[in-house]
Image (spheres, rainbow, N blue to C red):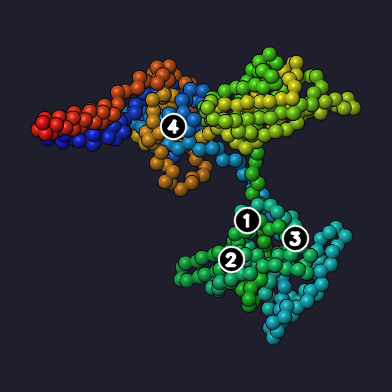
Amino acid sequence: MKYIWLIISLLSINPVSMAAQNQLKPADFAYGIPIETVNDDSIQRVVLPLTVYQNVTRDDLSDIAVFNRAGERVSHEIRAVAAAQKKRTYNLVFFPIFSDKNSSQAINLEFVRADDGSLIVKGNPNTQPDNMLTAYLVDTRTIKNQWLENVILTWEETDKTWINALKLLASNDLQNWIELPIAASVAQLNYKDEHILRNTIAINKVPYNYMLISANKSLDFQLEQLQAITVTQQDQPYDWFTIQANAKSWRQNEYEFHLPRGMSVSALDINLGKQANMIRVEVFSRNQVKLPWQRRTEAIIYNLMLNKQRLINQQLEFGSSRDSYWLIKMSKIPNDLTSLTVGWHPDELIFIADGNAPYTLAYGNANITKYQSMNMMSQMPLVKDISSAKLGKPFNLSGLNALKPAAKPIDYKVGILWGVLLLGVFFIARMVFILWKQMR
């Protein structure tokens, strides 16, 4: 019986938990790149160069690590580089609207369009002392359908304390209005030496020509300026990776090629040469050889001459993919086709500068497992304006030896299970033999 308990205790040992205790070190990787931090910030970033993608062994880039001078791993995160944003400030034209204190009806105003297209409001009774300010009409045509960061209201600040809950209406023709589902309020609070000013309205987009900022009662502020800050995403330029694919490399108008692992690919440029061509192209990809092909895009590319001007359309764009295996099908192959260029976006690696510099970006390990990935930064809030560290020249750590899968270790757990099974069969057979002998 004591041997049975020994077997059970051996089976309770989890080889994964044992492996997880083995800390990775720089020598476990094929290559390294020195990282030079530019300041004392605890969070630094680098853009991964092409050589990293060419030498990693996992599509999820989990065989990448960052070490400090003492050879200790530091936490890191790999993510796509955020597109640059361009901000622009617009000064919006606005008109105050007054209502009679003794009536709930707003005073009728006459809107007149000038020759230059601007809006003129006639009969604005702001000089009448018996009227109260209840709304502002805003001309939003200059920012129509643009993405907004926010709208900023500016008024002359006083010692008064007030809060105004606002209601936002929108219209294209100044006759038909709809209420925008936006909860907005502005405030000016003063208490002793404390002062709180809330003068922004969070609006993502205004798909209308005009907007009405109103309140149930009178407004406690008089606008001096109304600004809208728009945000435009800048197109991120591609890095281009060349694939040698001359006409002889194609088989039945198809060409397969393999890309480095983990590359985020979203464009393909096919050089049609100087001859006139109009060709139908289909692009497919897959992550493993045994998986079926997935269509990425289909288009017509051409290189034509018209009225002594060359018309060229040979670049295809599609949704980003990190697949390694690609297939191109063309209706015909140009005789002077020499190469393809793949448009991709490198990722950025963000790491905690824990411990002493210099730091080392290590990559390429055929034996690393997913659970060994060390990423704790996903628990942190998104940080902008991270300092960019500098990368040095790549150097060998363990070289090609780290890129070779190690011999598959003996699975002692399976062996022990087979042993228990055979031992159980032996005991049952022995009991059957004893019972059979007694029955005789």
- Residue carrying label 2: 183
- Residue carrying label 1: 204
Between the C-alphas of marks 4 and 3, the distance is 50 Å
In the drawing, does residue 409 fall left or right of residue 223? left
Between the C-alphas of marks 4 and 2, the distance is 44 Å
SS at circle 3:
loop
In the drawing, does residue 366 fall left or right of residue 17? right
The answer to whether marks 4 and 3 mark residues whose Cβ atoms lie closer than 8 Å is: no
Q: Give the mark nearest the N terminus, 4 or 3.
A: 4
Q: Give the mark nearest the N terminus, 4 or 2.
A: 4
SS at circle 1:
loop
The location of residue 435, given as percent across then percent down, is 13, 33
Q: Please, what is the three-letter code of the amino acid marked with disc 1?
A: Asn
Q: Give the mark nearest the N terminus, 4 or 1.
A: 4
In the drawing, does residue 162 fall left or right of residue 215? left
**Residue at the spot 26% in from the left edge and 28% down from the top edge:** 418
The answer to whether marks 4 and 2 mark residues whose Cβ atoms lie closer than 8 Å is: no
**Residue at the spot 40% in from the left edge and 33% down from the top edge:** 370
Q: Give the mark nearest the N terminus, 2 or 3.
A: 2
Between the C-alphas of marks 4 and 1, the distance is 36 Å
Quadrant of image for the N terminus: top left
**Label 3: how many residues lie within 10 Å, few (<14), some (14-19) or many (20+)?**
some
- Residue carrying label 4: 62
Disc marking residue 209: 3
**Residue at the spot 75% in from the left edge and 19% down from the top edge:** 334
SS at circle 4:
loop
